[in-house]
Image: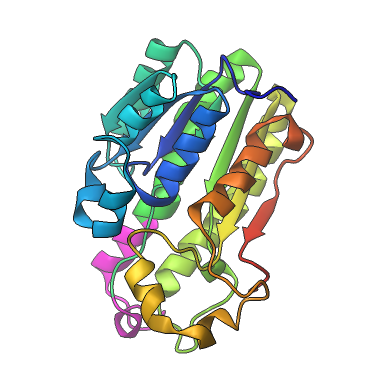
Amino acid sequence: MTAQPLLGKSAIVTGAARGLGRAYALRLAHLGADVAILDANLRSYEDFEQERVAMTAESTMAEVEGLGRRSLGLEVDVTQSNAVTAAIDEVAANFGTVDILVCNAGGGLGTPAETGGSVIEDDVLDAVIRRNLYGTMYCCRAAAAHMKRQGSGRIVTKSSLGAKRPEIEGGYAHYGAAKGGIESYTRYLAQELGPFGITVNCIAPGVIRTGRTAPIHDSMGSEAVKKISLRRFGSPDDCAGAVEFLVTDLGSYVSGATIPVDGGFF
C-alpha cells in the first residue's frame, strides 16, 4: 500500500470540528484525501479547554489544509434532511466526487434518571433519535446518490457500546436504541449498495478519552480502567485506525459489519 492510499479521493466527515470527528478528518487527510467538514458549529472545540489545546490551527479545515489537502467547512444540522442533501451536493460540486462518508455526528441528551425507557419525555426522545439515527440516514442517503453514479464508495457509520451494554439503571435508553438502529440500518444499506461497489460498515467506540470527556475520565479513577481488558481508555486515534481500515483497500471485502473499538470492554 502506498504512503497515501487515499490520494485523489474526497471524504466527508460529520461532527468533525473537534473530538473523534476531527481525528477521523485528520487521519483521512494524512492518507491523502481531501476532506469536507460538516458540523453544526465549526468552532465547537472552543467550548472545551482540552479540545482547544489540541488544535494546531484555527479550525479542522485549516489543519487539513496544513497537511497539503483541500478542505471545505459547512455548518449543517444533520437532523435537517434538505440541508444535509444541499451540503453533500456542494461537496460533490467542489471536489468532483464523494468517495468516503464518515457519519460521526450524534450524541446524547438528558440525565440517566430522565432517560429510562419508561420515563423519557417526548422532546428528549425525539431530539436524540433524530440527531443519531435520522442524521445518519440523511447523510448516507445523500452521499449514496453520488456514490451509486460513480460505482464506488465507502461509508462508515458510528454506533456505541451503549447499543449492546445498557446502563445498570437503564438510563440513556433513547441513545442505545438510536445506536442499535444505526447498526441495523448499516446492515440493510450494505446489502442495497454492495452491487454498486459501495461498502457500508459501522464502528462502535467504547470508553474513548476525548478533550470533552477527559475531565470525566480523570475523575473515574483506576477502578474504571480495570473493567477494560486492555487496561486503558481508548483514544480518538484508536477509532481513527478502524476508520482507516474500512475506507482503504485493507477493508475492501468487509461490508455490513459493526466493529467494536472498546479495548475488549464488551
In the drawing, does residue 105 fall left or right of residue 153? left
**Vertical relation: 50 (above or below) 74:** below
Residue 156 percent coordinates (x, y): 57, 41
The location of residue 157, given as percent across then percent down, is: 54, 46
Quadrant position of the N terminus in the picture: top right
Q: Which residue: 57% across, 76% down?
A: 165
Question: Is residue 88 depicted above or below 104 in this figure?
Answer: above
The image quadrant of residue 119 is bottom left
Q: Report whether residue 133 is seen.
A: yes
Q: Which residues are magenta?
A: 111-129
- Image point 57% across, 21% down: which residue? 147
At horizontal 50% and vertical 88% (from top left) the residue drawn is 168
216 to 76, vertically: above or below? below
Residue 119 versus residue 260: which sits nearer the camera? 260
> Does residue 53 appear to the left or right of 70 in the view shown?
left
Quadrant where the image shows the C terminus: bottom right
Any part of residue 81 in sight: no
The image shows residue 80 at horizontal and vertical percentages of 29, 40
Q: For the point 61% across and 65% down, which residue is it?
A: 262
Q: How is the image coloured?
A: rainbow
Task: List the single residue furthest toward the right.
Answer: 253
Q: How many marks?
A: 0
Q: Is residue 117 magenta?
A: yes
Give the quadrant of residue 50. bottom left
Above or below 19: residue 231 = below
